[in-house]
Amino acid sequence: MASVSPSPSCSTIPIPLRRTSFAVAELRRLKQRRAIPPVSVGLGHFADVVRNDVDFLKNKIGIGLRWANEAFRVPEVTKSAEELFWLRHLEDHTSQNLKSQSWPQPSYSGLTGVDLFMADVKALETYAGYFYSLSKMWSRPLPEVYDSQAVADYFNCRPHVVAFRLLEVFSAFTIAAIRLRTSASVKGKSLEASEQIFGMVLKETMLHLGPTFIKVGQSLSTRPDIIGTEISKALSELHDRIPPFPWPEAVKILEGELGGPVESFFSQFSQETVAAASFGQVYRGRTLDGADVAVKVQRPDLRHAVLRDIYILRLGLGVLRKVAKRENDIRVYADELGMGLAGELDFTLEAANASEFQEAHARFSYIRVPKVYQHLTRKRVLTMEWMVGESPTDLLAISSGYSDHDNESHEKQKIEARRRLLDLVNKGVEATLVQLLDTGILHADPHPGNLRYTTSRQIGFLDFGLVCRMQRKHQLAMLASIVHIVNGDWACLVESLIDMDVITPGVNTRRFTLDLEYALGEVKLINGIPDIEFTKVLSKIVNVALKYQLRMPPYFTLVLRSLACLEGLAAAGDPNFKTFEAAYPFVVQKLITENSAATRKILHSAVLNRKKEFRWERVALFLSKSSTRKQSPLLKLSRDETSVDSSSNLTDKDADNVSLVLRLLASKNGVVLRRLLMAANGTSLIRTFISREALVIRQKLCMTIATTMYQWMVGSLGIESLKFISLSDPPPSSGINITVKDFKILINDKRVRVILRKILESAKSDRVLMLRFCWTSFVMSLTTTALACHRFVISVSEGYVNYLSLSAPVALRT
């Protein structure tokens, strides 16, 4: 068949016919669908369709926004708008500090027309000078070192910045309150769930408001006993889980501060943030000589944001002062906070603090401070040694975690993490006491993000932006205050508060003592130690001081903050932790071993009354607490100077105390005790020694001397050299024993003889007392001799009987 090619005119006819037939078919299909009864479609399908549409729109809108940012240069415009908002283009860093001018006040005193004209010219000149000075103030930048007046002058020229910040803070907390209100309206929520929601909302609000509020949140997170565990857990994420700023901005700051590209200072440098804090974020790098380092880079435009919040806080305290009609200026608290935060903004100061802290604590092997690389440190860049260790937050999460898989191995991990956490807490307490009462350089921000537990079982400190330096008199006053709080000597505590510059001249100390006794008198004692946290005691003291409108010294608030962080960490690691119970042995050791006029004065006021008579219950408390301390030089004395094993269990505390006193009297560490006995009333000593209350002490003294005499008898008669007699072991005694060598040293020591002679001479006038003392000494001598001889005879008899029982079978066989 011949094929006929269709013409163009003919080929256009069937196409619309095909489209029409397709449209008709679709129309029929739609009619058939309408005829079918409707079937319910699942909401899940509808949600998927809507979600896909939303994702499509987000994707397209994101593409459009990125194109707009590139086309219209939105980041550059935003940066320019920010500069215009802060009026940074008017700042002149070379301008000199000018005094702020007040509005001129013209005066008219019957001048003539010419005089008035000249006065007007002079007034115009004055006004022109005022406006010129005002224009110069607009160009003055923020000070590098905190100055309240300079900061006020800066923000007085920028009231719109303060207004926008106030609006931002108010709106943030308003939104948070609305969120909490809507979540609280849901019924059936437990208290724990409510606290979780509150903590999450509070954390997000702090993050939104910036570095200053993040610092406040970090301080609150260390006190779960005050704000609750769940809220504390949520706020603890502010330590190291803060959103970082972009890497390009960090590179710009790094290269600007170091003066060259990063590659010229570091052989390796990670672009990923290791940790992000409120004031900066940390990167890991490696120097050109191969040392691993942590590089801390400050956040951009941080100084303006921090000092703006401090200025607003200062304004608020000023308003509060006027409303409360307080005489003292409470705005100084904002100034102290501003000086502290402004100091943290200069990383060169932090580097100097770290070096000073490391040098002061180099003799304490359990304290670790990373090395500072000074040649790689600037005002906004800090380079320190990379420290490997676990944070308290990680240890706490592991020790309290739960897992359904491999329970046995998980339990072992929990137990090991718990052990490391408790070791970290104990060393943290020890380190804080050393800083507070020994070196005087105190890490004022030891929250969990700034602590590490290293593989060598050391406690590592990070972030030295806030360091408190205490004067020697403040350290001694703090030491005395702990003793006076334990003893309940409120009048002496007030004297210590005067030495700490908490109580100023002009305050009625009698009324203050009564108020202090009322505030602290209800504290319970357990084994002679107050059952209360140290920060709560300091808070009560602060409340009483504020009642008298006293201002706390700057170091006192830093000490309170540091101890609050410590107690928060300790409470998380050990719920039964007691600050006074952990601190008092350290205090007692320092008083007994440190031979200085100030510490002797504190010790005398603690254990002697006004008549120089011993307060024996306090002496017993001192000795018992000193013997429980692991690093006590008294225990070290018994380990180092004798061959007796002092690691046995302390089964008899009274015997331990007697042994401690006898050994300490003739030792080089007994200077303070010998001076104390020389200063005490000898008559009262003898009277107390022969009293009924001292019967237990006399018995323990007899047992101790009898043990020493028994050892002398065994050694002098050569019983141990007889092989056919095996002496039985002596009965278990206290963990700190007196050997024959120690007893000889004690008897032959001239210093001890002088003390005994002085005590006896002071009691010569009372012949009845001396007669009773001689009789008591005679009875004790007989008792001691009888105990030693009885023990010697029993030991020899048992040894001989054992020898006969072992040799009897041999005799029968022969």
Image (cartoon, helix red, strand yellow):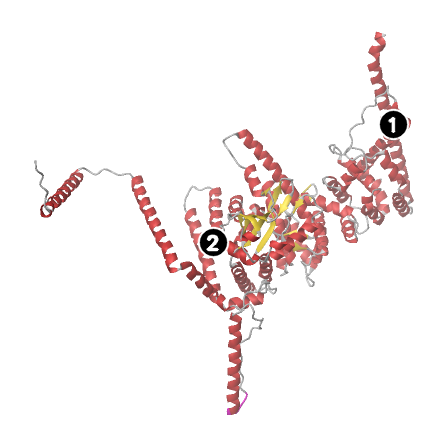
Q: Secondary structure at mark 2?
A: helix
Q: Where residue 514 sits in the image (x, y, percent)?
A: 67, 55
Instruction: Judge whether residue 130 is colored magenta.
Output: no
First along the sequence among labels 1 and 2: 2
Name the spot of residue 738 as percent of width and height, x first.
82, 35
**Taking 729 as reference, is 233 left or right?**
left
Residue bearing the label numbered 2: 208
Q: Is the N terminus in the top left, top right, bottom left or bottom right quadrant?
A: top left
Q: Which mark is residue 570?
A: none
Q: Quadrant of residue 803?
A: top right
Give the dominant element type of the magenta stretch: helix, strand or loop: loop
Q: Quadrant of the C terminus?
A: top right
Q: Position of residue 76 (x, y in %)?
A: 43, 60
Q: Amino acid at mark 2?
A: His
Q: Disc 1 designates what residue?
A: 714
Looking at the picture, does residue 294 appear above or below residue 122? above
Front residue of 783/634: it is 634
Q: Which element type, helix, strand or loop, lies under badge 1?
A: helix
The type of residue carrying mark 1 is: Val
The magenta segment: 109-113
Residues 210 and 334: in front is 210
Task: Confirm whether residue 489 shows in the render.
Answer: no
* 556 on left or right of 759: left
Residue 307 coordinates in the image, percent (x, y): 54, 61
Q: Quadrant of residue 148?
A: bottom right
C-alpha distance separating marks 1 and 2: 79 Å
Judge by depth and name the residue closer to the eye, 41 or 537.
41
